[in-house]
Image: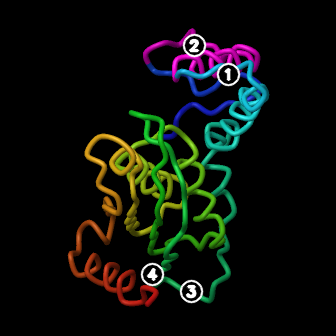
Amino acid sequence: MDAVVKPLSALSAVPKADKTFVRPSREEAEEAVRTLIRWAGDDPRREGLLDTPKRVTKAFGEFFGGYAEDSAEVLSKVFEEVEGYDDMVLVREIPFSSHCEHHMVPFVGHAHIAYYPSEGVVGLSKLARLVDVFARRLQTQETMTAQIVDAMDEHLRPRGVAVLIEAEHMCMSMRGVKKTGSSTITTRFSGIFRDDPSEQVRFMSMVRGFERR
């Protein structure tokens, strides 16, 4: 299920544990950035940092713009006149960037999405937009993988969905174990893909068989 989505000018997604949560003002957000700068050991009053709080809050609006988007709207337009096409549709290597909800540092990678249409097909660009709806939130890769599949199942009602996401997490390469270049792969299948292992093999073969050389 999608998070509760409201315009960024109003409330942000309301945490399940606290229905009284209210989104702070821009001024409060900027002051929080100044506090973090001081905590890091620098002076937010120096020339190079004077406008940093404004830049950071503006950047956060871009990084986390997915809270203001709705997967139902993204997938609302379905094309039914496709000459009876009912085979797999695959969009490979959709680039994305997200932020780990545990450390608020980026993870960056590609998503591969396939589905078997039942009532028509959705515009290919909409699948890329769907990835961004969930990537542009505080996330875990596992949750994001499940959210994409669940949204497609709910709004497109296909005969099956397959999603594979591979990403490098800065929380592993910049901090902690500091293992640069390691990648994490997550998958989720529904419908035909879940019930028929041969369809999973076909999906993986199509994803891997045409990788850039």
- Secondary structure under tag 4 reads loop
- Secondary structure under tag 1 reads loop
Which quarter of the picture shows residue 213? bottom left
- Residue 21's disc is 2
Q: Residues within 10 Å of mark 2 (few under 14, many from 20)?
A: few
Q: Earlier in the sequence, mark 1 or mark 4?
A: 1
Residues in magenta, as a range: 17-40
Residue sitting at x 66%, y 55%: 74
Name the one closer to the observer, 153 or 109: 109
User: What amino acid does circle 1 point to?
Assistant: Leu
Query: Could you say where residue 155 lies in the image, as x and y percent from the top left?
Result: 55, 54
The verdict on residue 21 being magenta is yes
Is residue 9 left or right of 142 when viewed as pictured? Answer: right
Residue labelled with disc 3:
84
Residue labelled with disc 1:
11
Residue labelled with disc 4:
88
Name the one closer to the observer, 98 or 35: 35
Which quarter of the picture shows residue 9? top right
Q: Is residue 67 above or below residue 124?
A: above
| Secondary structure that dominates the magenta span | helix
